[in-house]
Structures are given as C-alpha cells and as structure tokens.
Amino acid sequence: MPRIVSLIPSATEIVAALGHGDDLVGRSHECDHPPGVEALPALTAPKVPLEGSSREIDDRVRALLDEAMSVYDVDVERLNALQPDVILTQSQCEVCAVSLPTVEQAVADRIEGVPTVVALEPRSLADVRDDIRRVAAALGCPDRGDRLVRRMRDRMQATSNAVAPADATDRPTVAALEWIDPLMGAGGWVPTLLEAAGGTPVFARRRGDLDALHEADPDRIVVMACGFGLSRTDAELDVLRTNPQWTALRAVQTGHVYRADGNHFFNRPGPRLAASLDILAEILHPDRFHAAVDRSHRDTAWRREPAPDPRRPGSSFSPTSPPQ
C-alpha cells in the first residue's frame, strides 16, 4: 500500500473518503479531519502568527507574498524520514496551504527516492471532482474515485432539487464573504454552490470595502471566513458590528446575516462540499430543506446573527434570538 503524505486538509479528507486513511503517514498542521488524523506527524507550520485581527493577519501574509516568500515552512527532515510514495499538495493558492514550488524544492533537495507529487488545483466544482479522480488514480483506486464523485454529485443534486425555487423572485441575492477585514467575496466553487442552494450570488470574487458591498446590498450575507470556525468568526465580526455602514445593510437590518464554519466546510474543496451545499440550502430555504432532507447543520456549522435592536439606537444587535 502507498505511504501517503497530505499537505492540505482537503486532500487528507479525500484520501480518507477513498478508504486509504490508514495509509497516511504525515499531514499538514491544519489537517484535523477525519478524527484521529491529528495523531500523525505535522510536517508544515505557518511563518506568520495567526493571532490578532483579520486585518493584521492579511497584512502579515501579504508582506511575505510581496517578498516572493512562502507563507509556510515544511519539515523536510521529517518528511524525508517518512519515505512517502505519494505527496499531496496544491497549486491553487499560496495563502491556503503549502505551495507546489515549496514541495518540489523539498523533494529535489532532500527526499530519497522519487515520490509521486500530486498538486490539486480546484477553481470550480468540476475541478474538485477531477482532483478526486486524480488522487484516486495516484493511489491506484480509480474506481473508488469515480464512486466517490457519483455519491457527492447525487447527494448535491438531491439537495438542490429539494430547495429549487419556483421562479426567479424566490432566489435571494447572497454575498458570501471569505474574509472579513478587508472584505473579500468568495469565488471558486462557492457561487456554484449558492446557485445550487437556490440563491443568486453577488459580490463574488471581489476584494472591496463596505461601499462596494452596499452597491450589491444583498438579501442575505453568509460569512465563511477562510480558516475560521464559528467562534473565531464571531469575534472577528466585531469590527463590522460597530460600523454604521454595516448595520445599514438590508441583510443586517432584516436579520439575515449568517456565520458559517469556513474552516471545515466551504474552504476545503473535497467531500464536505456536499455538506457545504446543505448549509447554504438550509440557510436560504429552510422550510423546503427540512421537508425533504433529514439532517441539519444549524448551531454546529452555522448560526444566525441577531438583527439590530430598534429599541436601542446606536446598538448593532439585539440580545434576543433572531426570528426563525
């Protein structure tokens, strides 16, 4: 069986879904699913502190990128000792995980033997499916890859069918934010997921400010900050909650702002994109979703923000629960 090192969480989840979880011998510092994978040696580490605000993290990362430096370190000595047959990484985003050039340099400099390096590069939902098949082929189980893709596609199609709007007027406009300060609209596969969940994406693939978000003035806002879970996103949103421009947005005024776990779902292009679609469908069309689907991610993977309290001028949010 192949000895597998995965340097990106989505690839780790793909390997496990293909039935090769027991063949993993190393992981990235961010790999934490499925449970138990944390016991494997972590071979990467960020070069910048992850404490501080969204703005501070963004500034640190961009300073490294401006100097053409990698954002992550790879423990080459430990990687070499593990003698992997297959190394999984990515070539999509230098911010998200260890980049392909970093891995190629490590392999060229120190790794004994000639491991197969597979670099995932998903920029769309179709690319995610192709990457699953590429990983399966590298592991010698192409049939499993085809079956996993079919299971994902069938589940996602069933969810999309369950919440399909009757007409265009039943499709709320939705801004999905993958970063908070500065504001960044989610791209990649997220607009496709929004459409499949019965919404119309706006502010997609944009880096802007509240003025730009006001131009879109979406019916719904879903905050799915990359690398942040619910608690961290809750804390980071304070920079917006006190801003009058934010509280004036239609979605904020009507109580249609949602925090989602962007770390474990939307920003991991692998099997859990099916659950990511469930989350959006449950947010946008809860009645139809619950009538057809016997599962829920509320409170575990997403939460709804309270609307402003009209009894307290100048206050951003009510202490009471939002309407259901």
Image (cartoon, rainbow, N blue to C red):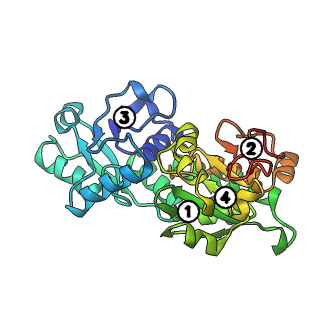
Disc 3 target residue: 1
Disc 4 target residue: 247
| Mark 2 vs mark 4, CA separation in Å | 12 Å
Labels 1 and 3: the sequence-earlier one: 3
Residue that extends furthest to the left in the rendered view of this protein: 109
Question: Horizontally, is 42 left or right of 133 in the view?
Answer: left
Disc 1 target residue: 189
User: Are the residues flagged by discs 3 and 2 in contact, CB closer than 8 Å?
Assistant: no
Name the mark nearer the viewer: 1 or 4.
4
Label 4: how many residues lie within 10 Å, few (<14), some (14-19) or many (20+)? many
User: Are the residues flagged by discs 1 and 4 in contact, CB closer than 8 Å?
Assistant: no
Disc 2 target residue: 318
Rendering coords of residue 234 (x, y %): 58, 42
Residue 96 makes an appearance in the image:
no
Please tell me whether mark 1 sits on a helix, a strand or a loop: loop
Q: How many marks?
A: 4
